[in-house]
Image (tube, rainbow, N blue to C red):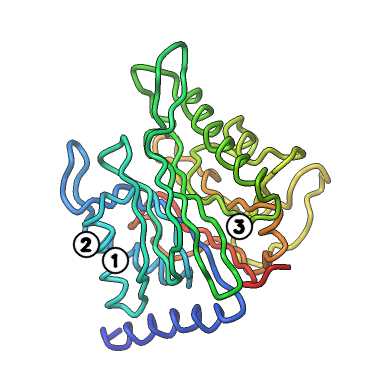
Amino acid sequence: MPNTARFFLALLACAAGLAHGAESFRVATYNLQNYLDAPRGTRPAKSDPAKSKIRESILATKADVIALQEIGGTNALLELRDNLKREGCDFPFWELVNAWDTNIHVAVLSRFPITRRVTHTNDFFLLFGKRHFVKRGFAEVDIRVNDHYTFTLFTAHLKSKLTVWDADEQELREEEATVLREILDAILSARPNANVIVAGDLNDVRDSKAVRTIINAGRKHALIDTRPAEQNGDDQPNNNPRYPPPQITWTHYFGKEDSYGRIDYILMSRGMAREWVSNETFIVRLPNWGVGSDHRPIVATFVADDR
Protein backbone atom coordinates (compact mmCIF):
# COMPACT_ATOMS: atom_id res chain seq x y z
CA MET A 1 0.00 0.00 0.00
CA PRO A 2 1.45 3.44 -0.88
CA ASN A 3 2.58 5.60 2.02
CA THR A 4 0.01 8.28 1.15
CA ALA A 5 -2.80 5.76 1.40
CA ARG A 6 -1.49 4.53 4.74
CA PHE A 7 -1.39 8.09 6.06
CA PHE A 8 -5.00 8.80 5.10
CA LEU A 9 -6.17 5.49 6.60
CA ALA A 10 -4.42 6.42 9.85
CA LEU A 11 -5.95 9.89 9.71
CA LEU A 12 -9.41 8.38 9.26
CA ALA A 13 -8.81 6.08 12.23
CA CYS A 14 -7.87 9.03 14.43
CA ALA A 15 -10.74 11.12 13.10
CA ALA A 16 -13.08 8.28 14.01
CA GLY A 17 -11.71 8.41 17.53
CA LEU A 18 -12.17 12.18 17.71
CA ALA A 19 -15.70 12.12 16.32
CA HIS A 20 -16.53 9.31 18.68
CA GLY A 21 -14.94 11.37 21.47
CA ALA A 22 -17.56 14.13 21.13
CA GLU A 23 -19.91 11.91 23.16
CA SER A 24 -17.51 9.30 24.47
CA PHE A 25 -13.81 8.58 24.69
CA ARG A 26 -11.43 5.65 24.74
CA VAL A 27 -8.70 4.76 27.22
CA ALA A 28 -6.07 2.15 26.31
CA THR A 29 -3.09 0.58 28.03
CA TYR A 30 -0.10 -0.97 26.30
CA ASN A 31 3.19 -2.43 27.54
CA LEU A 32 5.69 -1.62 24.78
CA GLN A 33 8.33 -4.20 25.85
CA ASN A 34 11.52 -2.20 26.21
CA TYR A 35 10.82 0.69 23.86
CA LEU A 36 14.36 2.07 24.10
CA ASP A 37 15.84 4.69 21.77
CA ALA A 38 19.37 3.44 22.57
CA PRO A 39 20.84 0.26 24.10
CA ARG A 40 20.91 0.14 27.90
CA GLY A 41 22.86 -2.64 29.56
CA THR A 42 21.66 -5.93 28.09
CA ARG A 43 18.57 -4.30 26.55
CA PRO A 44 18.88 -3.41 22.86
CA ALA A 45 17.31 -0.38 21.21
CA LYS A 46 13.84 -1.02 19.79
CA SER A 47 14.03 -2.05 16.14
CA ASP A 48 12.30 -0.09 13.39
CA PRO A 49 9.94 -3.00 12.53
CA ALA A 50 8.96 -3.26 16.21
CA LYS A 51 8.33 0.49 16.43
CA SER A 52 6.22 0.36 13.28
CA LYS A 53 4.08 -2.47 14.67
CA ILE A 54 3.62 -0.59 17.95
CA ARG A 55 2.38 2.46 16.07
CA GLU A 56 0.04 0.26 14.05
CA SER A 57 -1.29 -1.23 17.29
CA ILE A 58 -1.82 2.19 18.88
CA LEU A 59 -3.61 3.44 15.77
CA ALA A 60 -5.87 0.39 15.93
CA THR A 61 -6.98 1.27 19.47
CA LYS A 62 -8.42 4.61 18.26
CA ALA A 63 -7.68 5.70 21.82
CA ASP A 64 -7.91 9.23 23.13
CA VAL A 65 -5.73 8.45 26.15
CA ILE A 66 -3.05 5.75 26.38
CA ALA A 67 -1.31 4.46 29.50
CA LEU A 68 2.13 3.16 28.53
CA GLN A 69 4.58 0.86 30.26
CA GLU A 70 8.22 0.07 29.43
CA ILE A 71 8.92 3.30 27.54
CA GLY A 72 12.63 4.07 27.62
CA GLY A 73 12.47 7.69 28.71
CA THR A 74 11.44 11.16 27.58
CA ASN A 75 13.31 10.95 24.26
CA ALA A 76 11.73 7.60 23.42
CA LEU A 77 8.27 8.85 24.39
CA LEU A 78 8.55 12.00 22.30
CA GLU A 79 9.91 10.03 19.35
CA LEU A 80 6.87 7.74 19.53
CA ARG A 81 4.52 10.69 19.90
CA ASP A 82 6.09 12.56 16.97
CA ASN A 83 5.94 9.52 14.70
CA LEU A 84 2.30 8.94 15.61
CA LYS A 85 1.59 12.56 14.73
CA ARG A 86 3.24 12.08 11.32
CA GLU A 87 0.90 9.16 10.76
CA GLY A 88 -2.14 11.26 11.58
CA CYS A 89 -2.63 10.83 15.34
CA ASP A 90 -1.69 13.74 17.57
CA PHE A 91 -1.35 13.39 21.34
CA PRO A 92 -0.43 16.94 22.46
CA PHE A 93 -0.33 16.13 26.17
CA TRP A 94 1.94 13.67 27.92
CA GLU A 95 3.38 12.59 31.23
CA LEU A 96 6.35 10.37 32.11
CA VAL A 97 7.49 9.18 35.52
CA ASN A 98 11.21 8.96 36.28
CA ALA A 99 11.35 6.54 39.19
CA TRP A 100 13.87 4.05 40.56
CA ASP A 101 13.98 1.91 37.43
CA THR A 102 16.15 4.05 35.16
CA ASN A 103 15.66 1.88 32.06
CA ILE A 104 11.90 1.66 31.60
CA HIS A 105 9.13 3.98 32.70
CA VAL A 106 5.37 4.46 32.89
CA ALA A 107 3.86 7.26 30.84
CA VAL A 108 0.66 8.74 29.43
CA LEU A 109 -0.23 10.12 26.00
CA SER A 110 -3.44 12.14 25.76
CA ARG A 111 -5.44 14.10 23.23
CA PHE A 112 -7.11 15.90 26.12
CA PRO A 113 -5.49 18.41 28.49
CA ILE A 114 -3.78 17.10 31.61
CA THR A 115 -4.89 19.44 34.38
CA ARG A 116 -3.13 17.88 37.39
CA ARG A 117 -0.05 15.68 37.76
CA VAL A 118 1.21 13.67 40.71
CA THR A 119 4.38 11.65 40.18
CA HIS A 120 4.58 8.87 42.74
CA THR A 121 8.32 8.22 42.81
CA ASN A 122 9.15 8.02 46.51
CA ASP A 123 6.47 5.66 47.82
CA PHE A 124 8.06 2.83 49.77
CA PHE A 125 7.28 -0.14 52.00
CA LEU A 126 9.16 -2.29 54.50
CA LEU A 127 9.73 -5.97 53.79
CA PHE A 128 11.49 -7.92 56.55
CA GLY A 129 12.85 -4.65 57.89
CA LYS A 130 14.27 -3.45 54.59
CA ARG A 131 12.97 -0.39 52.75
CA HIS A 132 11.88 -0.93 49.14
CA PHE A 133 10.64 1.77 46.79
CA VAL A 134 7.93 1.18 44.21
CA LYS A 135 10.40 0.63 41.42
CA ARG A 136 8.55 2.23 38.50
CA GLY A 137 6.38 4.54 40.55
CA PHE A 138 2.86 5.44 39.46
CA ALA A 139 1.69 8.14 37.08
CA GLU A 140 -1.38 9.97 38.41
CA VAL A 141 -2.97 12.57 36.14
CA ASP A 142 -6.30 14.35 35.90
CA ILE A 143 -7.53 14.53 32.31
CA ARG A 144 -10.20 17.02 31.21
CA VAL A 145 -12.22 15.40 28.42
CA ASN A 146 -14.56 18.37 28.07
CA ASP A 147 -15.84 21.31 30.10
CA HIS A 148 -17.93 19.08 32.35
CA TYR A 149 -16.05 15.78 32.53
CA THR A 150 -12.69 15.01 34.14
CA PHE A 151 -11.21 11.72 35.30
CA THR A 152 -8.11 10.58 37.17
CA LEU A 153 -5.85 8.06 35.47
CA PHE A 154 -3.24 5.94 37.23
CA THR A 155 -0.66 4.15 35.12
CA ALA A 156 0.94 1.22 36.93
CA HIS A 157 3.59 -1.40 36.16
CA LEU A 158 4.03 -3.72 39.12
CA LYS A 159 7.10 -5.87 39.80
CA SER A 160 7.59 -8.57 37.19
CA LYS A 161 7.86 -12.29 37.92
CA LEU A 162 11.59 -12.21 37.25
CA THR A 163 13.51 -13.14 40.38
CA VAL A 164 15.69 -10.60 42.17
CA TRP A 165 18.41 -11.19 44.73
CA ASP A 166 17.13 -9.09 47.61
CA ALA A 167 13.46 -10.11 47.98
CA ASP A 168 10.71 -12.41 46.76
CA GLU A 169 9.20 -11.06 43.53
CA GLN A 170 5.65 -11.99 44.54
CA GLU A 171 5.93 -10.23 47.89
CA LEU A 172 7.36 -7.13 46.19
CA ARG A 173 4.45 -7.08 43.77
CA GLU A 174 1.93 -7.50 46.58
CA GLU A 175 3.49 -4.66 48.57
CA GLU A 176 3.48 -2.36 45.53
CA ALA A 177 -0.20 -3.22 45.07
CA THR A 178 -0.86 -2.32 48.71
CA VAL A 179 0.79 1.08 48.23
CA LEU A 180 -1.43 1.75 45.20
CA ARG A 181 -4.54 0.65 47.09
CA GLU A 182 -3.70 3.09 49.92
CA ILE A 183 -3.42 5.94 47.40
CA LEU A 184 -6.77 4.96 45.89
CA ASP A 185 -8.42 4.73 49.31
CA ALA A 186 -7.29 8.27 50.13
CA ILE A 187 -8.85 9.61 46.92
CA LEU A 188 -12.09 7.64 47.15
CA SER A 189 -12.53 8.34 50.86
CA ALA A 190 -12.49 12.06 50.10
CA ARG A 191 -14.55 11.73 46.90
CA PRO A 192 -16.50 8.44 46.80
CA ASN A 193 -17.97 9.20 43.37
CA ALA A 194 -14.68 10.23 41.78
CA ASN A 195 -13.97 9.11 38.23
CA VAL A 196 -10.82 6.97 38.56
CA ILE A 197 -9.11 4.51 36.22
CA VAL A 198 -6.16 2.26 37.04
CA ALA A 199 -4.54 1.00 33.84
CA GLY A 200 -1.39 -0.96 33.21
CA ASP A 201 0.61 -4.14 33.56
CA LEU A 202 0.00 -5.62 37.00
CA ASN A 203 2.13 -8.68 36.18
CA ASP A 204 -0.27 -11.14 37.75
CA VAL A 205 -3.57 -12.94 37.16
CA ARG A 206 -6.99 -11.79 38.30
CA ASP A 207 -7.12 -14.06 41.36
CA SER A 208 -3.65 -13.16 42.62
CA LYS A 209 -3.26 -11.35 45.93
CA ALA A 210 -1.72 -8.32 44.20
CA VAL A 211 -4.61 -7.81 41.78
CA ARG A 212 -7.22 -8.61 44.42
CA THR A 213 -5.65 -6.00 46.69
CA ILE A 214 -6.02 -3.28 44.07
CA ILE A 215 -9.55 -4.27 43.07
CA ASN A 216 -10.68 -4.72 46.70
CA ALA A 217 -13.86 -6.51 45.57
CA GLY A 218 -16.83 -6.48 47.91
CA ARG A 219 -15.29 -3.82 50.09
CA LYS A 220 -15.35 -0.08 50.39
CA HIS A 221 -13.90 1.80 47.41
CA ALA A 222 -13.72 -1.34 45.26
CA LEU A 223 -12.69 -1.09 41.63
CA ILE A 224 -14.44 -2.85 38.76
CA ASP A 225 -12.56 -4.91 36.18
CA THR A 226 -13.51 -3.98 32.61
CA ARG A 227 -12.12 -7.37 31.40
CA PRO A 228 -11.56 -6.53 27.71
CA ALA A 229 -11.90 -9.48 25.34
CA GLU A 230 -11.43 -10.20 21.66
CA GLN A 231 -14.37 -9.08 19.54
CA ASN A 232 -14.77 -12.43 17.79
CA GLY A 233 -18.44 -13.20 18.36
CA ASP A 234 -18.13 -15.00 21.71
CA ASP A 235 -21.25 -14.01 23.65
CA GLN A 236 -22.28 -17.00 25.77
CA PRO A 237 -22.01 -17.30 29.56
CA ASN A 238 -19.83 -19.82 31.31
CA ASN A 239 -21.36 -23.23 31.99
CA ASN A 240 -20.26 -22.66 35.58
CA PRO A 241 -22.11 -19.53 36.80
CA ARG A 242 -19.33 -18.79 39.29
CA TYR A 243 -16.92 -17.97 36.48
CA PRO A 244 -16.81 -15.20 33.86
CA PRO A 245 -17.72 -15.89 30.22
CA PRO A 246 -15.15 -18.05 28.36
CA GLN A 247 -13.92 -15.24 26.14
CA ILE A 248 -10.39 -14.75 24.80
CA THR A 249 -8.91 -12.24 27.22
CA TRP A 250 -5.17 -12.93 27.26
CA THR A 251 -2.94 -9.88 26.97
CA HIS A 252 0.59 -11.30 27.29
CA TYR A 253 2.70 -14.10 25.82
CA PHE A 254 5.32 -15.57 28.16
CA GLY A 255 7.89 -17.14 25.86
CA LYS A 256 9.77 -19.09 28.54
CA GLU A 257 6.65 -21.08 29.40
CA ASP A 258 5.05 -20.84 25.93
CA SER A 259 1.93 -19.61 27.74
CA TYR A 260 -0.60 -16.81 27.49
CA GLY A 261 -2.15 -14.86 30.35
CA ARG A 262 -4.18 -11.80 31.31
CA ILE A 263 -1.91 -9.49 33.28
CA ASP A 264 -2.87 -6.09 31.78
CA TYR A 265 -5.92 -4.35 33.20
CA ILE A 266 -8.22 -1.36 32.96
CA LEU A 267 -9.91 -1.01 36.34
CA MET A 268 -12.45 1.67 37.20
CA SER A 269 -14.07 3.22 40.24
CA ARG A 270 -17.79 2.86 40.80
CA GLY A 271 -18.27 6.48 39.77
CA MET A 272 -16.47 5.87 36.48
CA ALA A 273 -18.35 2.61 35.91
CA ARG A 274 -21.58 4.56 35.39
CA GLU A 275 -20.09 5.94 32.17
CA TRP A 276 -18.55 2.66 30.95
CA VAL A 277 -19.55 1.37 27.50
CA SER A 278 -18.95 -2.35 27.94
CA ASN A 279 -19.64 -3.41 24.35
CA GLU A 280 -16.91 -1.06 23.10
CA THR A 281 -14.27 -2.50 25.41
CA PHE A 282 -11.88 -4.92 23.73
CA ILE A 283 -8.43 -6.35 23.01
CA VAL A 284 -6.74 -5.21 19.81
CA ARG A 285 -6.13 -8.11 17.40
CA LEU A 286 -3.53 -7.67 14.67
CA PRO A 287 -1.53 -10.09 12.53
CA ASN A 288 2.05 -10.42 13.78
CA TRP A 289 1.21 -8.39 16.87
CA GLY A 290 4.26 -9.91 18.61
CA VAL A 291 6.69 -8.04 16.35
CA GLY A 292 6.03 -4.95 18.46
CA SER A 293 5.69 -6.31 21.98
CA ASP A 294 4.93 -9.41 24.01
CA HIS A 295 1.77 -7.63 25.20
CA ARG A 296 -1.41 -6.69 23.34
CA PRO A 297 -3.12 -3.32 23.90
CA ILE A 298 -6.52 -3.26 25.58
CA VAL A 299 -9.19 -0.58 25.28
CA ALA A 300 -12.19 0.62 27.31
CA THR A 301 -14.77 3.18 26.21
CA PHE A 302 -16.64 5.69 28.37
CA VAL A 303 -19.36 8.30 27.94
CA ALA A 304 -17.97 11.77 28.61
CA ASP A 305 -20.77 12.82 30.94
CA ASP A 306 -21.28 12.10 34.65
CA ARG A 307 -24.26 9.82 35.21
Q: Amino acid at mark 2?
A: Asp
**Secondary-structure class at tag 3:** loop
The quarter holding residue 287 reads: bottom left
272 left or right of 76 in image = right
Residue 225 x %, y %? 65, 50
Residue 239, disc: none
Q: Which residue is mark 3?
A: 228
Q: Earlier in the sequence, mark 3 or mark 1?
A: 1
Please tell me whether residue 268 is drawn above or below residue 276 in the rendered image.
above
The quarter holding residue 129 reads: top left
Contact between labelled residues 1 and 2, with CB atoms less than 8 Å apart: yes
Residue 17 x %, y %? 50, 78
Q: Amino acid at mark 3?
A: Pro
150 left or right of 293 in image = right
The C terminus - image quarter: bottom right
Q: Which residue is mark 1?
A: 52
**Secondary-structure class at tag 1:** helix
Residue 175 x %, y %? 51, 27
271 left or right of 29 in image = right
- State how far apart marks 2 and 1 are (Cα): 6 Å
- State how far apart marks 2 and 3 are (Cα): 29 Å
Please tell me whether residue 31 is drawn above or below residue 234 in the rendered image.
above
Please tell me how crowded label 2 is: few (under 14), some (14-19), or many (20+) other residues with Cα within 10 Å. Answer: few
Q: Residue at x 32, y 83 (%)?
A: 7
The quarter holding residue 21 reads: bottom right
- State how far apart marks 3 and 1 are (Cα): 24 Å
The N terminus - image quarter: bottom left
Number of disc labels: 3
Q: Which residue is mark 2?
A: 48
Q: Residue at x 57, y 81 (%)?
A: 22
Q: Residue at x 41, y 66 (%)?
A: 58
Contact between labelled residues 1 and 3, with CB atoms less than 8 Å apart: no
